Amino acid sequence: MSLRQYIVAAVLAGASLASADNLQPAPESPVRGTVTVRGCYSSLGELKPVYDDNNFNSKGACNTECNKLGNYVAATALDTCYCGDKYPPSSAKVADNRCSEPCPGFDQEACGGLNTFSVYNTGVRVTVDESDDPKTSSKSSSPTTTRTAHSSTSTTAPAQATSAPAETVSETPDSDSDSGGSNTVGIAVGVVGGILAVGAACGAAYFYMRRRRNEEIEEEHRRNAAVNAFITGGKSPGSSDGLSISDSRLDPVMVNRRMSDGSIADNQDYSRRILRVTNA
């Protein structure tokens, strides 16, 4: 046997020995529809047990059960199977040789180890999130709580300190606004009352003057009627015996003329005969 052949045989023997000692395969890239190894973990994260005390538990049996449930991730630990939709946190990943416990259903595969779990991708989904790291979450939550406490304390103190002045200042504007409102209402009522009073006085004066004017007109009519009755002797001016000298249609010249005016001349002497010469 040549040196080269000896080296190749030694490498193959070491590889077979290593594979026999390490039942947990190396991590693989996820493939849809195919079960792939994610790695060996010291924590389950958000994975929950589906069954336990299964003497036939194996990689294939556990992944089949999780695949039926539609879960993305499966994990085995001896005779127990776990399912979920998130990988354990990356900080919980350990060396593959720590998952060295043979599966009860198939001893050529690893089903976890001492406080370790063999984790797989069920092939339902390639892209899967990881669970939150409890250590990181606890560290990040403590400062947040402290900051919240400080902020609440610092905010409450000024609020309490400024609450008293705010109440004191608010009392004065309220009283001023009340007095101002009452004064405004009083002024408005006074103005309206004054306008109504003036209107009432004007109305009374108007009706009084109108009534007085009507009385004067009626008195004048009575005087005229009395004068006409005295002149006409109690007869109406339109009758034959009555004469209305107040009628504006009569001509004063014609009224004073004699009724015989124009029949016989009063300035002529008709007792003597007078020779009249006429032109032939």
Image (tube, grey):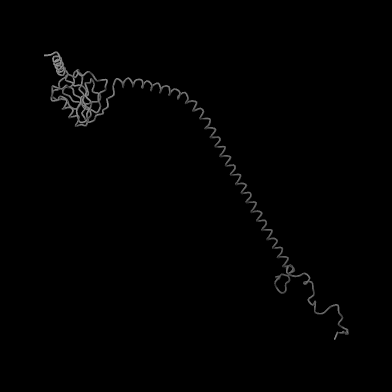
Q: Quadrant of residue 176?
A: top right
Question: Seen from this angle, which residue lies furthest left?
Answer: 1
Front position in the image: 184 or 232: 184
- Residue 276 versus residue 29 in the image, above or below: below
Residue 46: image location, x then y, percent = 25, 25
Front position in the image: 126 or 246: 126
Residue 166: image location, x then y, percent = 49, 27
| Residue 266 horizontal side relative to residue 176, left or right | right
Front position in the image: 18 or 68: 18
Number of numbered tags placed on the structure image: 0
- Residue 82 versus residue 259 in the image, above or below: above
Question: Seen from this angle, which residue lies furthest front?
Answer: 2
Front position in the image: 249 or 144: 144
Residue 139: image location, x then y, percent = 32, 19
Residue 218: image location, x then y, percent = 68, 61
Quadrant assignment for the N terminus: top left
Q: Quadrant of residue 138?
A: top left
Quadrant assignment for the C terminus: bottom right
Question: Seen from this angle, which residue lies furthest top?
Answer: 3
